[in-house]
Image: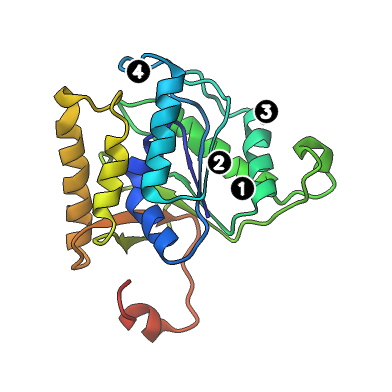
């Protein structure tokens, strides 16, 4: 499974608890940040932000983190960006991709561009007779693609095929610890942001009788071979 963000800390805020839980369940998990997030007001250098991202990845237990060299603040959905991410998918061959699911008004427009790049890269990943465009990597079909929303954004997206919530009661602490790794982004005067992120996780979990949760939206309807098991199965 690969989760894609525009900047280091996007994925942790959106679905860090889910990634940590997947690792504990024995799945291989990766993160791709399309940019290094620099420049940014609170960080003294790209090296600091990258070190924070590496520490956050260790906190979540993810197996691989890649930071691509696409430009922060100038991220755009174009052919080159699509190919770069699709090459990663073709090389690491995830079954599931998680990425941005909509615009984030009053926040970075890079998030919206990241969604479009990820959507296109999921498609590009499976294209045949075009290996030379992807560093001679073989085509790979991604089985499922789901959307996350940043914890501070409303979970309402037009055209969504429904959603689901993951129980992160056992990994909420890991999620918050991973976000705290970004000291340059969340100094003491921004600790209220972390409180809001934690509150949202608890609120989303409460709707499913969980201690905490992270919600996702489907790009296609979620099917089941066993309705009763899906509806009544033991919560994870």
Mark earlier in primary sequence (3, 2): 3
Q: CA distance from mark 4 to mark 2?
A: 26 Å
Q: CA distance from mark 1 to mark 4?
A: 32 Å
Q: CA distance from mark 3 to mark 2?
A: 12 Å
Q: How many marks?
A: 4
Q: Which mark is residue 118?
A: 2
* The quarter of the displayed image where residue 206 is located: bottom left
Query: Do residues under tags 3 and 2 come within 8 Å of each other at their CB atoms?
Result: no
Mark earlier in primary sequence (1, 3): 3
Placement of 128 over or under 230, stated as above or below:
above
The residue positioned 38% from the left and 49% from the top of the image is 60
Residue 114 in view in this figure: yes
Mark earlier in primary sequence (1, 4): 4
Query: Do residues under tags 1 and 3 come within 8 Å of each other at their CB atoms?
Result: no
Q: CA distance from mark 1 to mark 3?
A: 14 Å
Residue 109 in view in this figure: no
In the rendered image, which residue does mark 4 sit on?
43
In the rendered image, which residue does mark 3 sit on?
80
Query: Do residues under tags 1 and 2 come within 8 Å of each other at their CB atoms?
Result: yes
- Numbered disc 1: secondary structure: helix
The residue positioned 45% from the left and 84% from the top of the image is 226
In the rendered image, which residue does mark 1 sit on?
122
């Amino acid at each position: 499974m690969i989760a894609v963000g525009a900047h280091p800390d996007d994925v942790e805020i959106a679905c860090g608890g889910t990634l940590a839980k997947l690792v504990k369940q024995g799945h291989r998990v990766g993160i791709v940040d399309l940019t290094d997030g620099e420049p940014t007001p609170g960080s003294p250098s790209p090296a600091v932000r990258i070190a924070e991202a590496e520490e956050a990845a260790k906190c979540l237990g993810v197996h691989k983190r890649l930071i691509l060299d696409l430009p922060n603040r100038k991220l755009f959905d174009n052919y080159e960006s699509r190919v770069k991410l699709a090459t990663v998918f073709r090389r690491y061959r995830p079954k599931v991709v998680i990425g941005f699911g909509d615009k984030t008004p009053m926040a970075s427009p890079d998030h919206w561009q990241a969604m479009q790049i990820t959507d296109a890269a999921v498609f590009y990943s499976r294209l045949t007779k075009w290996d030379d465009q992807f560093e001679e990597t073989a085509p790979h079909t991604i089985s499922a693609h789901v959307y996350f929303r940043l914890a501070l954004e409303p979970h309402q997206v037009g055209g969504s095929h429904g959603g689901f919530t993951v129980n992160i009661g056992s990994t909420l602490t890991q999620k918050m610890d991973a976000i705290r790794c970004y000291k340059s982004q969340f100094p003491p005067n921004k600790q209220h942001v972390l409180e809001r992120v934690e509150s949202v996780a608890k609120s989303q979990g409460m709707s499913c009788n969980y201690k905490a949760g992270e919600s996702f939206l489907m790009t296609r309807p979620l099917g089941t071979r066993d309705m009763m098991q899906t509806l009544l199965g033991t919560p994870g």
